[in-house]
Amino acid sequence: MQLEAYKISDHNDKLQEAHQRKLSYWTEEVANAEEVIKKLIDFQIAIPSWALGTGGTRFGRFPGGGEPRSLEEKIEDVGLLHALNQSSGAISLHIPWDIPKDGEAIKNLAASFGLRFDAMNSNTFQDQPNQEHSYKFGSLQHVDRAVRQQAIEHNIDVIRHGVALGSDSLTVWLSDGSCFPGQLNFRKAFERTLESLQEIYAALPDNWKVFVEYKAFEPNFYSMTVGDWGSSLLFANKLGPKAYTLVDLGHHLPNANIEQIVSLLLMEGKLGGFHFNDSKYGDDDLTVGSIRPYQLFLIFNELIEGMDAKGMNHATDLGWMIDASHNVKDPLEDLLQSVEAIQLAYAQALLVDRLALEEARNGNDVVRAQEILQEAYRTDVRPLVAEARRRAGGALNPLTLFRQLNIRQQLIGERGLKTIATGL
Ligand SMILES: [Mn+2]
């Protein structure tokens, strides 16, 4: 389904007066409000194709109805999100869950919704039907050359699909590792993985990047071959200038200081992209900002500081993606919440008085430094985010409008109650 523009303008007209009142207050209070609004308009967050169906846990899955049945319908869903918030202008595909049969047609369909293709994701953590070799004991690290070769070829195939769609990056997340002490020679596993990644790297087009995503544990529980930012950075440095580390917020050990990791990776010029989600314990893949919004703000604070120090463009120089999946929420509502949480944290971080913060640090004024950060964090930037959406042609309140228009009911009407999206 397509969302007609008049439905958005009707919605905005009804809310305009109350919105304007709040906006006027905050544009007076916040010195750089206009700059923040402009930056928010440019800031786009990629939606992963696997987040559009109801996610499951290893204990079960409860599909919600009206889920997209094909890649075309997934693109339609991201198009709906983008029409509502004008901030979801990209889609990140997962191969082989979403193999485009006709790349040109899929690219044109996405363009008709104002979408482009962000990073492509390969998958060597599952066996596919008719696959010759199993990944049970790893893929790029495998002791058997033939298994490694199969995984390398899959990644090169994913690059090929990406080229046809106009994407310019590949994300490699490996479940490779070991479950028990003694199972794996860590050094040899690293070296085999590096050799495999080098072959994939050699197949990258000139303008492409490869993101090496790390994860502390699961599905392997004794060691992960790309288990932390240190090992990811080792791979990225050894591979070359087109290789970067990708940070997924849920892929750390509990209470890791992710903002410090971000700062150092930016310093090294090796932070490539981000997967947003939130968690209480491990890789919970909960809605962004639902558990630890202050941490998200602190991460954005370091992102802005580090990117500005290198003269990077906030909107285009890093890959911004959501990587979350849900069991109990409507996936589209969840994604609207996640995008909004990212925008709020970004806007708040843009408010930090960096000169004053540096001064407080140089004077060892710890109290003042904390006050400066929390002053920004406690500012209600919702009217600024809403204004950015309105100016870009989106809805002042996307979630309310999604419900008022009964979009899920319409999707169920079109697609049926018992549809299941491809994915986990
Ligand atoms: Mn991820």
Image (tube, rainbow, N blue to C red):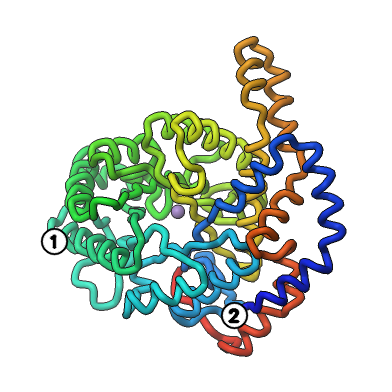
The residue at the far top in this view is 363
In the image, what residue occupies the spot 33% across and 62% down?
Answer: 123
Mark-to-mark CA distance, 1 and 2: 46 Å
In the image, what residue occupies the spot 37% across and 79% down?
Answer: 105
- Quadrant of residue 355 in the image? top right
In the image, what residue occupies the spot 52% across and 79% down?
Answer: 68
Percent across and percent down for residue 224 are 35, 46
Position of 250 compared to 143: left or right?
right
- Which amino acid type is shown beneath numbered disc 2? Gln
Numbered circle sitting on residue 2: 2
Percent across and percent down for residue 196 are 19, 51
Q: Element type at marker 1?
A: helix
Q: Is residue 356 above or below residue 130?
A: above
- Of residue 359 and residue 422, the one placed in the foreground of this image is 359
- Which amino acid type is shown beneath numbered disc 1? Ala
Percent across and percent down for residue 173 are 36, 53
Instruction: Name the image quarter holding the C terminus.
Output: bottom left
Residue 225 appears in the rendering:
yes
Q: Element type at marker 2?
A: loop
The residue at the far left in this view is 145
Sequence-wise, the earlier of marks 1 and 2 is: 2
Q: Residues within 10 Å of mark 2 (few under 14, many from 20)?
A: few
Determine which residue is flagged by label 1.
146
Instruction: Name the image quarter holding the N terminus.
Output: bottom right
